C-alpha cells in the first residue's frame, strides 16, 4: 500500500496546476514523495523484499529509489527558484510554468514506475513512457535547438526502445514453453526461478537486443548521440533529472534483464559484451569532452563517460565491482545533478552557455564558483570525494580480477577526461574578469539549499559510507549476482 | 485451417507490398494512407490469429490496433498534413530506386536471419520473415527520409513490424503488456506530432536534415 503513494503524489501534483501558489503545492508534493520513498527504503531494509500484484521492490530497487528520492527533492527545490527567475527574466510565460511543473511530476512518476514494476514487459512500457514524458520537457523552450534536440531524442530513443521491445518479445518467446502465456509471463521473479530452462540461443539474441535498446536510453556509445543535445537543451533542473535519474533507471532495466539472462547464458560472453560497451563509452566521451564549447554538453558527455564506468563495473561482475557500480550510480546521480543545477544558475547569470565566454566565476559569484570547482573535482574522481570512492572500487576490482590491461587503459582514459574537464573548469572559474559586467542577482534560497545539500552529500560520502547504506548495497549486490 | 493459412499468406504478401511501396512514395498523404492500410492488415492478422487460437484477448488486441493505428494515428497525421499549404514532398537521402533495392535486400536478409536464428518458430516462416523485414524497412525509412512525417511513418512501420514478430513467433503478448505498448505508440505519435507542429509554427521547415545546429 505504501507503494501507491509516490504514484498518487505524482498524479495529484500533476493536476494542481491552476493556482499561483504552484510552488507550495509542488514543494509539498515532492517532500511527500521523497519521504514515502524513504519509508519504502527503510521498509526494504528491515523486512526484505516487498511484493504485490504487479509491483516488486527489493534491495536493488532500493538503491535506485534512493537516487530518485534525493533527486526529486533537489530538483524540485532547484526548480522553484530557477524557473521563477526564468519567469522574471521573461524567458517563459506563466502558462509555460504550469506546463513545466505538470510535466515534471509526470516524468518523476514514470521513472518511479520503472523502478517498482515487476513484469519485464511493463518495465518496457514504463521506460518508453519516461522517454515521452521527458521529450516534452526537453523541447520545453520550443526554440529551434530545443525542437531539434527533442526530435533526435524521441526518434533515437524510441528506435532503441523498439529494439528493446524486440528483445523482450524474444525473451517472452523463450519462456513461453515454460511459464506460458498467462499473467505470470515475463514476471521477473518467475523468470529468475526457471532461468535455466530457457533456450540459450534465443535468450542470447534477446539480450543483445535488450542491451542495445535500453543502452540507447542509458547513453551508452555508440547509441548516445541524443544525449548531448537533449541534456543541453532541456531546462537545467530537467537536465539534472535526465542525467541523474533517468540514465540510472535505464541501467536498472538492463540489470534486471541481466539477472534473468545470466542464469542461462555463458558468463564470459555477457562480461565481454558489457565491458566492451562500457570502455567504448568512456573512450568516445574523451575526445568530445576535450573539444567542447558548451558547458552543458560538456556535462552531458561526462554522463556518457560515467555510464560507461557503471556498465564496466557490472561487466567485470565480481561482487566488489558490482558494489562499486551501484555506489557509482548513486554518487554520479547526486554529483551530476548538482553540476547541472550550478551550470543552470551560471548560464542564467551569464546569459550564455559558451565556455569561452564564461569567465571569472570566483570573483562574480564566489560561493557558486567554489561549489562548481568542488563539484567538478568530485565528478572527475578526485579524492576525498564520493565519486573517487566508487571509481576506485571499480578499477580495483578490475585489477584484482586479473584484468590488468583493462584497468590500466581505463585509468588512462579517465586521466584524459580529468585533464579536459579541469582545463575548462579552471578557465571558467579563474582566469580574469568576464567581458562585460555581470549583474549577479540573488540565487533563490531553495535553489541554494538544494545545491549546498548535494555538495555536502558528496563531500561526506567521500569519507564515510553509513552502515545502512553499506548493508543495503551488499544485499543489492547479492541480488544482482543471482542470490 | 487451410483457408486461414491462405488468408494469412495473402495478408503477409500485402504487408510486404505496402512496406516496399512506402520506400517509393514521396507525397506525405499517400504515405499516411499506405500506413493506414498496413495497420489495418496487421489488425486483421491479429484477428485471424485470434480465431485460430480462440483467445478473446487477441480479438481485443485486434480491435485496439484497428482503433489506434488505423483510426486515431492516421487521422492525426492527415490533419497535420492537410493544414499545411503546400504539399511537402520528401527529398530522401537515398533516392527512390535505391531505397526500393535496399528494401528488397532487407527482405532477403530477414529470411536468412530467421532461418539462422529461430528455426523452431511457432508461426509460419514467412510471417516471421515479413515481420523482421518490415521492422528493418521501417528503420531504413527513418534513416533515409528527411521529412518529419515520413520519419513518423517509418516509426509506425517499425512498430507494426515488431508487433507482427510478436504475433507470429508467439501468439501475442499478455493483454496488459499489449495495452501498454499501444498506449506508448499512441503517445509517441502524439508527442512527435506536437513537435512537428511546433517545428512548423516556429517557421522552420519540417525538413529534419535542416536541424543540424547541434553538433560536436
Image: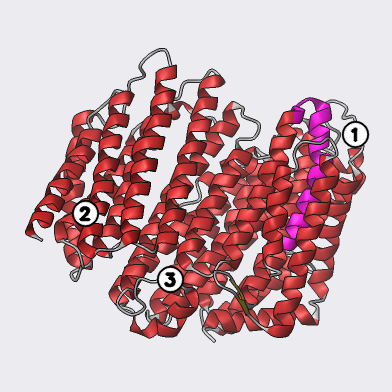
Q: Which mark is residue B48?
A: 2
Q: Position of residue A400 (x, y in %)?
A: 58, 84
Q: Is residue B137 magenta?
A: no
Viewer-proximal residue among B112 and A366: B112
Local secondary structure at mark 1: loop
Q: Which residues are magenta?
A: A68-94
Q: Circles 3 and 1: CB distance less than 8 Å? A: no
Local secondary structure at mark 2: helix
Q: Is residue A71 magenta?
A: yes
Q: Circles 2 and 1: CB distance less than 8 Å? A: no
The CA span between labels 3 and 1 is 58 Å
Q: Is residue A14 left or right of residue A271?
A: right
Give the number of the mark in front: 2 or 1: 2
Residue under label 1: A440
Give the number of the mark in front: 3 or 1: 3
Residue under label 3: A183
Q: Is residue A54 left or right of residue B164?
A: right
Amino acid at each position: 500500500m505504501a507503494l501507491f503513494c509516490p504514484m498518487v503524489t505524482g498524479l495529484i501534483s500533476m493536476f494542481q496546476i491552476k493556482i499561483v501558489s504552484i510552488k507550495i503545492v509542488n514543494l509539498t508534493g515532492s517532500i511527500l514523495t521523497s519521504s514515502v520513498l524513504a519509508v519504502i527504503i527503510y521498509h526494504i531494509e528491515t523486512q526484505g523484499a516487498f511484493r504485490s500484484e504487479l509491483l516488486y521492490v527489493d534491495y536493488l530497487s532500493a538503491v535506485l529509489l534512493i537516487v530518485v528520492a534525493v533527486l526529486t527533492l533537489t530538483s524540485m527545490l532547484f526548480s522553484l527558484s530557477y524557473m521563477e527567475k526564468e519567469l522574471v527574466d521573461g524567458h517563459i510565460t506563466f502558462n509555460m510554468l504550469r506546463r513545466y511543473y505538470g510535466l515534471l511530476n509526470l516524468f518523476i512518476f514514470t521513472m518511479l514506475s520503472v523502478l517498482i514494476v515487476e513484469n519485464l514487459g511493463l518495465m518496457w512500457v514504463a521506460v518508453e513512457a519516461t522517454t515521452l514524458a521527458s521529450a516534452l520537457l526537453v523541447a520545453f523552450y520550443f526554440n529551434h535547438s530545443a525542437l531539434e534536440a527533442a526530435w533526435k531524442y524521441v526518434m533515437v530513443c524510441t528506435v532503441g526502445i523498439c529494439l528493446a521491445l524486440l528483445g523482450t518479445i524474444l525473451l517472452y518467446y523463450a519462456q513461453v514453453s515454460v511459464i506460458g502465456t498467462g499473467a505470470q509471463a515475463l514476471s521477473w521473479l518467475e523468470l529468475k526461478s526457471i532461468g535455466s530452462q530457457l533456450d540459450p540461443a534465443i535468450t542470447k539474441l534477446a539480450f543483445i537486443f535488450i542491451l542495445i535498446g535500453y543502452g540507447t536510453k542509458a547513453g551508452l556509445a555508440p547509441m548516445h548521440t541524443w544525449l548531448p543535445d537533449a541534456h543541453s537543451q532541456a531546462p537545467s533542473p530537467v537536465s539534472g533529472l535526465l542525467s541523474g535519474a533517468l540514465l540510472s533507471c535505464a541501467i536498472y532495466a538492463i540489470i534486471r534483464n541481466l539477472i534473468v539472462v545470466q542464469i542461462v547464458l555463458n558468463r564470459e560472453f555477457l562480461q565481454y559484451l558489457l565491458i566492451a560497451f562500457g570502455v567504448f563509452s568512456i573512450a568516445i566521451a574523451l575526445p568530445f569532452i576535450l573539444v567542447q564549447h558548451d558547458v552543458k554538453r560538456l556535462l552531458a558527455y561526462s554522463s556518457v563517460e560515467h555510464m560507461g564506468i557503471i556498465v564496466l563495473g557490472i561487466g567485470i561482475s565480481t561482487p566488489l565491482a558490482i558494489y562499486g557500480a551501484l555506489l557509482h550510480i548513486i554518487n554520479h546521480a547526486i554529483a551530476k545533478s548538482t553540476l547541472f543545477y550550478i551550470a543552470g544558475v551560471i548560464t542564467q547569470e551569464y546569459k550564455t552557455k559558451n565556455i569561452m565566454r564564461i569567465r571569472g566565476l570566483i570573483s562574480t559569484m564566489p560561493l557558486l564558483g567554489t561549489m562548481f570547482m568542488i563539484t567538478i573535482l568530485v565528478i572527475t574522481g578526485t579524492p576525498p570525494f564520493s565519486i573517487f570512492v566508487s571509481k576506485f572500487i571499480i578499477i580495483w576490482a578490475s585489477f584484482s580480477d586479473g584484468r590488468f590491461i583493462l584497468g590500466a587503459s581505463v585509468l588512462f582514459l579517465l586521466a584524459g577526461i580529468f585533464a579536459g574537464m579541469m582545463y575548462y573548469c579552471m578557465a571558467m572559474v579563474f582566469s580574469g574578469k568576464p567581458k562585460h559586467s555581470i549583474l549577479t542577482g540573488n540565487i533563490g534560497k531553495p535553489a541554494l539549499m538544494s545545491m549546498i545539500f548535494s555538495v555536502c552529500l558528496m563531500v561526506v560520502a567521500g569519507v564515510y559510507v553509513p552502515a545502512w547504506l553499506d548493508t543495503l548495497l551488499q544485499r543489492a549486490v547479492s541480488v544482482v549476482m543471482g542470490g | 485451417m487451410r483457408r486461414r493459412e491462405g488468408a494469412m499468406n495473402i495478408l503477409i504478401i500485402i504487408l510486404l507490398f505496402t512496406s516496399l511501396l512506402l520506400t517509393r512514395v514521396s507525397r506525405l498523404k499517400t504515405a499516411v494512407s499506405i500506413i493506414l492500410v498496413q495497420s489495418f492488415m496487421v489488425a486483421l492478422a491479429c484477428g485471424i490469429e485470434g480465431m485460430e487460437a480462440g483467445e478473446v484477448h487477441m480479438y481485443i488486441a485486434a480491435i485496439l490496433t484497428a482503433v489506434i493505428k488505423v483510426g486515431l494515428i492516421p487521422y492525426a497525421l492527415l490533419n497535420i498534413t492537410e493544414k499545411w499549404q503546400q504539399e511537402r514532398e520528401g527529398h530522401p537521402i537515398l533516392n527512390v530506386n535505391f531505397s526500393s533495392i535496399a528494401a528488397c535486400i532487407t527482405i532477403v536478409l530477414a529470411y536468412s536471419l530467421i532461418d539462422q536464428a529461430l528455426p523452431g518458430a511457432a508461426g509460419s516462416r514467412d510471417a516471421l520473415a515479413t515481420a523482421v523485414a518490415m521492422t528493418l524497412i521501417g528503420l531504413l525509412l527513418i534513416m533515409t527520409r528527411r521529412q518529419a512525417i515520413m520519419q513518423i511513418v517509418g516509426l509506425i512501420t517499425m512498430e507494426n513490424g515488431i508487433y507482427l514478430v510478436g504475433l507470429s513467433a508467439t501468439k501475442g503478448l499478455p493483454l496488459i503488456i499489449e495495452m501498454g505498448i499501444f498506449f506508448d505508440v499512441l503517445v509517441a505519435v502524439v508527442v512527435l506530432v506536437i513537435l512537428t507542429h511546433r517545428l512548423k509554427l516556429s517557421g522552420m521547415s519540417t525538413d529534419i536534415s535542416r536541424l543540424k545546429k547541434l553538433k560536436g
